[in-house]
Amino acid sequence: MKHLFLRSFRVFLWAFLFVFVLCAILFAYFNLPGPAPRGDVQFGVTFSSRFARDLGLDAPKVLRALFEDLGVRKVRIPVYWDVVERERGRFDFSDIDWQLDMAKQYNAEVILAVGQKVPRWPECFVPAWANTDALKNEAAIRFIQETIGRYKNRSEVSLWQIENEPFLAFGVCPPISGETLDREVAAARAEDTSRLILTTDSGELSTWIPAASRGDVFGTTLYRKLWSNRFGYITYPIGPNFFRFKEQLVRLFTQQKHFMVIELQAEPWANGSLTDVSLDEQWKTMNAEQLMENVRYARQVGFSDVYLWGAEWWYWLKEKKETPALWNAARSIFRAR
């Protein structure tokens, strides 16, 4: 009995040492000096008319400034289900119509994000009437079909994003099941065969494989500094090689060949709403210098397209706080093309 215990303990110890050494090697690799920054990256932004209004801004004025002043020509726009279909079966796309009209005016290309979970807190925008899982899931498919059917002939739409980080437990929605996402993607493909489907997942908190295997293009988030209720302010201790390693894993285990950074941190992640947190507190996770550092980091990751997260906040700082440094820094990024 004692001999068996000692043998089992040795096996456990060797297994532990193997895992420890492997983790140490990977951690060292992830933090090796990254490759030279990619020079031909195309930058875009996520724009939420809802968030712009939450900041007390005129949403059309913000979007026009992004196009005219900054020179943005790629934009991801969320389609908020609870706004479009307040009553079951009655659709009002007016808030999307004006955004696409303006994008067309400036020859910009648009990713339309549609589903139960789309960008901006609380991440989940299911109408109140969709109050059971069965009803919600069936109605979401019709909502996706209605959205794509309305806009599939709009030349400014480049991709359909189906759900936003569907497998991540973040926000007020539970994660979406693989079966539900499969049905939504299939419905999108049936409605429009001419465009690719974008699926997304967390850059730091997922393997990417379940999401990447379901879309034609995969988009990752990329955050550097954030607030944690458990640890306070933290910086992710990983270099660009972490994301390049995950890309190779996805290529190995799926058919995915197309990768982008769909959400590069370009606004604070603070302990509270941005309108309630002091600027000194906000600078702890984002300022003009950190923005430029994040852009350099994303260039080292090496994906061809990078969408910045925080455009509404840059404008809010400039207009409401008379602090244009972030706006000016963003201009230098987009005008450098």
Image (cartoon, helix red, strand yellow):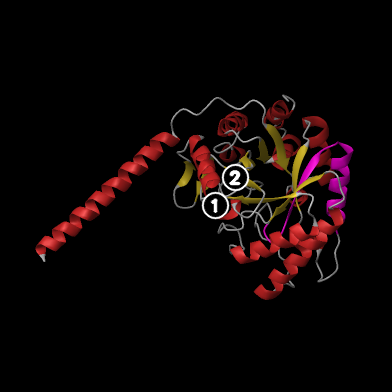
Of the image marks 1 and 2, the number of the one nearer the N terminus: 1
Q: Could you say whether the residue bearing mark 1 is in a helix, strand or loop?
A: helix
Q: Residue at x 48, y 41 (%)?
A: 236
Q: Is residue 241 visible?
A: yes
Would you call the spot at circle 1 few (<14 residues within 10 Å), some (14-19), or many (20 or more)? some
Q: Nearer the viewer, residue 327 or 124?
A: 124
Q: From which residue to which does the magenta span run?
A: 93-117
Q: Residue at x 49, y 52 (%)?
A: 229
Q: Could you say whether the residue bearing mark 2 is in a helix, strand or loop?
A: strand
x, y percent for residue 89: 83, 70
Q: Which mark is residue 221?
A: 2
Q: Residue at x 27, y 46 (%)?
A: 17
x, y percent for residue 103: 84, 41
Would you call the spot at circle 2 few (<14 residues within 10 Å), some (14-19), or many (20 or more)? many
Is residue 22 within the magenta segment?
A: no
Q: Nearer the viewer, mark 1 or mark 2?
A: 1
| Distance in Å between CA atoms under marks 1 and 2 | 14 Å
Q: Is residue 317 visible?
A: no
